[in-house]
Amino acid sequence: MFSKIMMHLSLLLISPTLASAEYQLISEKQIQRYDSYAQIDKQESSQWVSLNRVGDADSLSTEFLIQDMRCSDEDTPKRIKASGFYLSMSSISIAHKQPIVVPVTDYLGHWYLAQLDEKATKVKRNLQMKEVGVIRAGATSPQGYFMGGSDTNNRPLLMLYSSDLKRRKILSEKNSTEGEISGIFNRGNEVAAIYNKRSSEYSSAKFSSELRLYSPVGMEVAKVRLDGLDGSGVALEDGSIIVSYWDSGKIYMERFNPDLSPKWKLMLHQIEGIASINGAVLIVGESLAWIGANDNKLLIHRIEKDGSAVSTRIDSNHKLNPPQPLKYSASAYGDEIHIRGRTNRGKGATLGAVTEFCLVEKP
């Protein structure tokens, strides 16, 4: 049944506590280029897919490097030759019930979906996506692939591709104002998408944002207004939804009941320095987590599912600058959070001095 719920609970006044935690650097290596990466969550496992350009100026080609999200000091990535030359890929996290697809761009700025075979050993299909300006989020349903971002006119764009990539259905409004889709995630067989519509000034006083739920075939079944921009989220087993977003220089987290009525809302932190707006939201054991950058450092909040307590952990020891575009890849293994990324290291980092790293945060 379609529901539109506008009421929100009062903000819970809970001060995050700075907790001592162990950040352990499991692996690091130096690479020459700042090539991009994405996270793939498929069948209870998480993999990290990064783009690697090989060859010289006369014979450049690209390959996908695939490795487990779990940190290991013996990382040996699987190499898959790409079917074209790509400059970058979307730094997103996609939960897959279908063969893996990776959104990539070529040197002309055209977007493609590179679909791997079932065993992720080769590129099976390569489809150019039309009218796409940027891809920021994705998820799958039994019917295919939900992909979202903005179109070439900077309007929110949400698409549903069939499993064989032969059919595309546009789910977003064609006459929308400027904005984008900032987050897509699964709730059972349903798919949630977070819409953002805003002015060119990127002012929190001139925005509208909402979460919309879709059936597996792309029918909108429910929606609820959000109080901030650039949201990301995750669904709990009982159907509740957790969303984080940015508003007026602060990062918030909000929980909605399965019927999308509001349950609680927390302010996590004030944005300072180089900071993530669209952080990763995870279920970690019996708790929740927000992973991103703030004040030029990796920051993790662990939040009780009832919103009763927040503990904050900051990595001040490894001097790893936040990655660009300020998006860490993160997965939970028991009570541990494993974090991957690529970044310059230290204040004196030069072009070519890029560190690929994997950190483990333990409570």
Image (cartoon, helix red, strand yellow):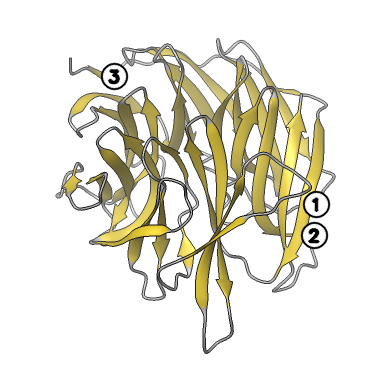
Task: State left or right for residue 265 relative to residue 276.
Answer: left
* Residue beneath the point at 31% across and 33% down: 141
10 Å crowding of disc 2: few (<14), some (14-19), many (20+): few
Amino acid type at circle 2 is Gly
Q: Is residue 319 above or below residue 93?
A: below
Residue marked by disc 2: 346
**Residue 36, picture quadrant:** bottom right
Image position, residue 260 (x, y; %): 33, 16
Q: Is residue 123 above or below residue 294?
A: below
Image quadrant where one finds the N terminus: top left
10 Å crowding of disc 3: few (<14), some (14-19), many (20+): few
For this orientation, the residue located farthest to the bottom is: 58
For this orientation, the residue located farthest to the left is: 175
Residue marked by disc 1: 319
* Residue beneath the point at 74% across and 69% down: 353
Q: Secondary structure at mark 1?
A: loop
Determine which of the numbered discs, if any, sits on residue 6 in the image: 3
Tag 3–tag 2 contact (CB < 8 Å): no
Callout in the foreground (3, 2): 2
Real-space Cα separation, disc 3 to disc 2, in angstroms: 45 Å
Image quadrant where one finds the C terminus: top right
Tag 2–tag 1 contact (CB < 8 Å): yes
10 Å crowding of disc 1: few (<14), some (14-19), many (20+): some
Tag 1–tag 3 contact (CB < 8 Å): no
Task: State left or right for residue 21 relative to residue 35.
Answer: right
Image position, residue 351 (x, y; %): 70, 74
Mark nearer the N terminus (1 vs 3) = 3
Front in this rendered view, residue 84 or 313: 84
Image position, residue 343 (x, y; %): 68, 58
Amino acid type at circle 1 is Lys
